């Protein structure tokens, strides 16, 4: 027995301890998740050699040791050091070794870069799906450290607007070595990138940014602030600032070209509801050195390349949280005896868990299908349209469903679900975040409307494809009609959430049809496309399907 498994029960003078669920121990995040295996098989390109490596990744990340890293990284959150002992500015953040261990593993696995080839093009067909599978499994273990991982991957898309920056930064972005040292990027073996858009007076409305940019030879000087800037120990940040021609995008490194620290001050770290392992800072810039990224005045157009990718990752990260919570709940009910029966054998508990499992299956299939659209965007206009249109809808549906989902799994553990020593409390506090950052729920719904208005052909293609794929499934045709009406009605802004959710549910059903047993897709359509609003989980499903869903959710020895 090692320190990660339960030690032998101690004798108690007052009572015997029994009927408490054993710790989860080592789990196989790949082999134990048949829905994931099926989804990757359906959506990654056949012959993608990286798929085979996912099995090893799932075992490694599913070890009790990695889950313990996740706990420690949150139990001992980062600390800001604004000054050193002599009063000089330091502006550094110190992290627990467990955080660095997770970062090292994610970087080694390439989650921060694996879709980017040497030339900045797609590294391999299916690269987005394979990366999504890794991101998802690592999110089951810990989500906070993924912030710089995800931002590095996504910010690279915005850098593509500036060949000079690509030549300089891409080789170190693509490095698989995690180098947390606080040194100028050219001296480092690997780098991470962050971004600063949000200011005090507005985040969704970035055009309200007041941070200024002034030209200084080939470079720029940035003066102002950012109200949220996560992972401030990254090596450089994409920053939006007002130039003469309007809002523009800049790359602002932590060090100036002469090797001295850049004029970026870390004011304080946010005291957050969750996401404790991740340092989210408030910063000020005072004439900070930066390079322009993309044309002056086109900052939003440039940075949106990044945002599309981070939104996909919000969906994938949310899926990891859902699976982690579901796995904990299923593990618990497989052991806990209540009223002389294991909880897993109580019909109502089975109904709740199977409905949760069905929700997770649909969301997972949608996330992987969306990742495959990113894989094929460059070669297929239809897939590019799917990625642009379905991304905000998927983020709206999936990310906003996570708090309710985790709450329901937490309740499966009864009182043990509500205490901080257990894993569910952390997942519950983490749950709302993916819906907030990178565009909150309403912004996603409005973005979808804007996209549909701009890309009439694209939306037509997406809806025609869904109609073809779902013609034999219950409620699909009526749901499609509701989406079409939602795009054209005079009250479309008020309807936008319903329109987006329904579109995402339709896309999820189609994705299930392509990747899961037919009965799973049928049950998802029957329980989710009818427009009925069941307020809680527990849709009754046929017994054989319940068995199958629970096994697909966590195929772990009972
Ligand atoms: C932990 C954490 C880390 C973060 N890290 C970063 C970071 O690294 N870099 C960064 O730039 N930002 C970061 N953010 C900021 C985040 O992206 C913003 O908080 C988010 O985009 C929302 O902006 P806001 O807070 O200004 O809210 P607001 O823009 O004021 O919006 C408030 C609410 O109004 C809704 N809303 C806005 N416009 C409309 C409308 N027209 N109609 C209807 N509803 C509307 C929004 O959906 C939202 O629900 C982080 C946030 C958190 C919580």
Image: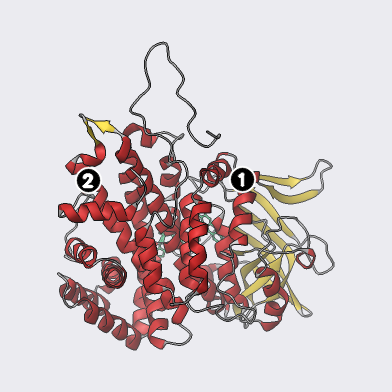
Q: Is residue 478 above or below residue 196?
A: below
Q: Which residue is mark 2?
A: 350
Visible residue check, residue 203? no
Q: Residues within 10 Å of mark 2 (few under 14, many from 20)?
A: many
Q: Residue at x 37, y 48 (%)?
A: 556
On the rendered structure, is 454 left or right of 135? left
**498 vs 385, nearest the viewer:** 385
Label 1: element kind: helix
- Residue 380 quadrant: bottom left
Q: Which residue is mark 1?
A: 98
- Residue 156 quadrant: bottom right
The residue positioned farthest toward the top in the image shown: 13
Visible residue check, residue 83? yes
Q: Residues within 10 Å of mark 1 (few under 14, many from 20)?
A: some
Of marks 2 and 1, which one's residue comes earlier in the chain?
A: 1
**33 vs 538, nearest the viewer:** 33
């Amino acid at each position: 027995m090692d320190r990660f498994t339960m030690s032998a029960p101690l004798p108690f003078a007052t009572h015997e301890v029994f009927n408490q669920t054993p710790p989860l121990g080592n789990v196989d995040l790949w082999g134990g998740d048949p829905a994931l295996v099926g989804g990757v098989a359906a959506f990654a390109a056949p012959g993608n050699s990286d798929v085979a490596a996912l099995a090893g990744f799932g075992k490694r990340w599913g070890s009790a040791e990695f889950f313990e890293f996740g706990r420690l990284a949150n139990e001992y959150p980062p600390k800001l050091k604004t000054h050193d002992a002599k009063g000089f500015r330091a502006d550094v953040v110190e992290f627990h070794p467990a955080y660095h261990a997770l970062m090292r593993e994610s970087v080694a696995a390439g989650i921060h870069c694996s879709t980017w080839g040497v030339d900045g093009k797609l590294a391999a067909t299916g690269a987005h799906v394979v990366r999504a599978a890794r991101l998802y499994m690592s999110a089951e273990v810990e989500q906070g450290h993924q912030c710089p991982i995800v931002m590095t991957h996504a910010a690279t898309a915005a850098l593509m607007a500036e060949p000079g920056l690509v030549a300089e930064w891409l080789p170190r972005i693509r490095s698989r070595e995690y180098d947390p040292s606080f040194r100028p990027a050219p001296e480092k073996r690997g780098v991470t990138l962050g971004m600063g858009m949000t200011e005090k007076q507005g985040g969704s409305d970035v055009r309200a940014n007041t941070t200024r940019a002034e030209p200084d030879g080939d470079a720029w000087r940035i003066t102002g602030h950012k109200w949220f800037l996560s992972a401030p120990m990254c090596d450089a940040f994409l920053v939006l600032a007002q130039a003469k021609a309007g809002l523009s995008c800049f790359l602002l490194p932590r060090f100036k070209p002469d090797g001295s620290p850049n004029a970026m001050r870390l004011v304080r770290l946010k005291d957050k509801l969750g996401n404790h392992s991740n340092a989210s800072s408030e910063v000020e810039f005072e004439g900070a050195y930066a390079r322009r990224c993309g044309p002056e005045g086109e900052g939003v157009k440039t940075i949106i390349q990044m945002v599309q990718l981070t939104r996909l990752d919000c969906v994938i990260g949310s899926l990891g949280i859902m699976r982690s919570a579901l796995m904990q709940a299923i593990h618990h009910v497989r052991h806990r005896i209540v009223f002389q029966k294991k909880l897993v054998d109580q019909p109502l508990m089975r109904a709740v868990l199977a409905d949760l499992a069905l929700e997770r299956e649909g969301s997972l299939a949608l996330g992987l299908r969306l990742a495959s659209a990113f894989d094929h965007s460059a070669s297929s206009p239809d897939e590019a349209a799917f990625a642009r249109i379905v991304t905000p809808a998927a983020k709206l549906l999936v990310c906003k469903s996570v708090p309710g989902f985790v709450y329901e799994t937490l309740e499966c553990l009864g009182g043990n679900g509500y205490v901080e020593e257990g894993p569910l409390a952390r997942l519950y506090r983490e749950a709302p975040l993916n819906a907030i950052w990178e565009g909150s729920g309403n912004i996603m719904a409005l973005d979808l409307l804007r996209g549909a208005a701009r890309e009439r052909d694209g939306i037509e293609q997406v809806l025609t494809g869904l109609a073809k794929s779902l013609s034999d499934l219950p409620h699909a045709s009526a749901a499609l009609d509701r989406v079409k009406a939602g795009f054209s009605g005079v009250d479309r802004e008020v309807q936008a959430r319903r329109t987006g959710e329904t579109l995402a549910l339709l896309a999820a059903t189609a994705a299930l049809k392509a990747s899961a047993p037919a009965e799973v897709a049928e049950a998802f359509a029957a329980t989710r496309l009818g427009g009925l609003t069941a307020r809680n989980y527990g849709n009754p499903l046929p017994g054989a399907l319940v068995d199958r869903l629970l096994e697909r959710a966590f195929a772990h020895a009972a």
